Image (tube, rainbow, N blue to C red):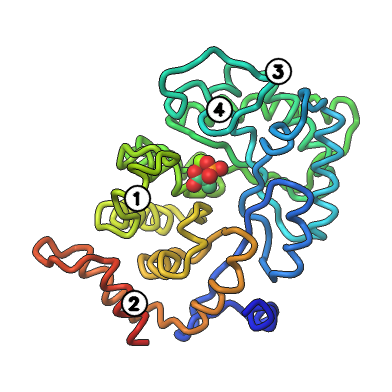
Amino acid sequence: RQAQFRSLRDVPPLTLDGQRIRLQMNAGLMVDLPHLAESGAEGIGLFRTELQFMIASTMPKMEDQEAFYRNVLKQAAGKPVTFRTLDIGGDKVVPYFRAAEEENPALGWRAIRLSLDRPGLLRTQLRALLRAAAGLELRLMLPMVTEVAELKAVRELLQKEVQRQSKMGEKLPRKLQFGAMLEVPSLLWQLDELMEEVDFVSVGSNDLFQFTMAVDRGNARVADRFDVLGKPFLRMLREIVRAGERNGTSVTLCGEMASKPLSAMALLGIGFRSVSMSPTAVGPIKAMLLALDAGKLAATLNPLLDDRQSSLSPRQMLIDFAEAH
Ligand code: PEP
Ligand code: MG
């Protein structure tokens, strides 16, 4: 199977009806980087920077972070890399960064919240990223955004770091792209403001599902109780795609859904044209899309999502569609 997928590496990612799909991969450590060339992914749609912190025994210094990011960009050899700023807290534990015990860590002091409360930590990371990407494109993405105001606050800190670098005569990135993860449902009621503020949006469907359905993503007892391919969640995701089209903002999805052929197919059916997945999924997902008539799927899936009477589940419809084609 893997050899068969390898032969697809250089095949253009076009659906049967000619839709161009952007396939990127997720990464977080140097060992992931060789997969970029091997899989034929177009870039790294999600680089989880907290992994460097999670495997270290002490806080990585600015120089260590810079060297690491520089190496990532070098190995990526010109393919775009979207760096997500530290997503510490919740299920991502950094042992030497011991915050007080929390009753609900997933809803607690984490990610961009922690970064804004510890601006020194965030500015150090932003500085390391700016320096590592000198002369290159820097794509930055913020995790767990709840309000657009948080993004504005980060942008101010970023501006300060940019000014600092240029005052010191340091070379800056040639281009800066600023984006947000959409993984907290409150952002659905700020979609237009959000998209005005950023260059791109990336849906973190793992956390978005957790917070939408109120199920702990790490709790086996409830994690599979509700379906990511059920009507509520697919309708929600479709709203995000529509907002992206309305605002001319690029929207991608980098959660686990993108790694499974059936759910990735659903994403294409509701209009996603860009996804980022685990490296081993790139081959299977490409094989799926090469055999897919996205227009035909959309014409079947969208009416079902709008149908209040039908008892057919979208999952069953998708399985039937996949089998029939
Ligand atoms: C997500 O929440 O879907 C996501 C991609 O981020 P992480 O899995 O790192 O929380
Ligand atoms: Mg997340």
Q: Answer with the quarter of the image where residue 324 lies.
A: bottom left
In this orientation, does residue 187 appear? Answer: yes
- Relative horizontal placement of residue 223, taking residue 30 as reference (left or right): left
Gap between marks 2 and 3 measured at Cα: 48 Å
Q: Residues within 10 Å of mark 2 (few under 14, many from 20)?
A: some
Viewer-side label of 1, 4: 1
Viewer-side label of 4, 2: 4
Q: Contact, CB < 8 Å: mark 4 with mark 3?
A: no
Q: Is residue 136 above or below residue 93?
A: below
> Which residue has dot 1 on it?
224
> Which residue has dot 4 on it?
89
Viewer-side label of 4, 3: 4
Gap between marks 1 and 4 measured at Cα: 23 Å
Which residue is depicted at the point 60% across and 58% down? 278
Residue 120, label in figure = 3
Gap between marks 2 and 1 measured at Cα: 25 Å
Give the image location of residue 150, x and y in percent. Answer: 51, 27
Asked whether 314 or 305 is in front, the reply is 314
Asked whether 201 or 92 is in front, the reply is 92
Q: Contact, CB < 8 Å: mark 1 with mark 4?
A: no
Gap between marks 4 and 3 measured at Cα: 17 Å
* Residue at the outermost top position: 100
Give the image location of residue 60, x and y in percent. Answer: 79, 27
Asked whether 299 or 33 is in front, the reply is 33
Which residue is depicted at the point 76% across and 23% down? 59
Residue 297, label in figure = 2
Upstream in the sequence, badge 3 or badge 1?
3
Secondary structure under tag 1 reads: loop
Q: Answer with the quarter of the image where residue 157 lies.
A: top right
Secondary structure under tag 2 reads: helix
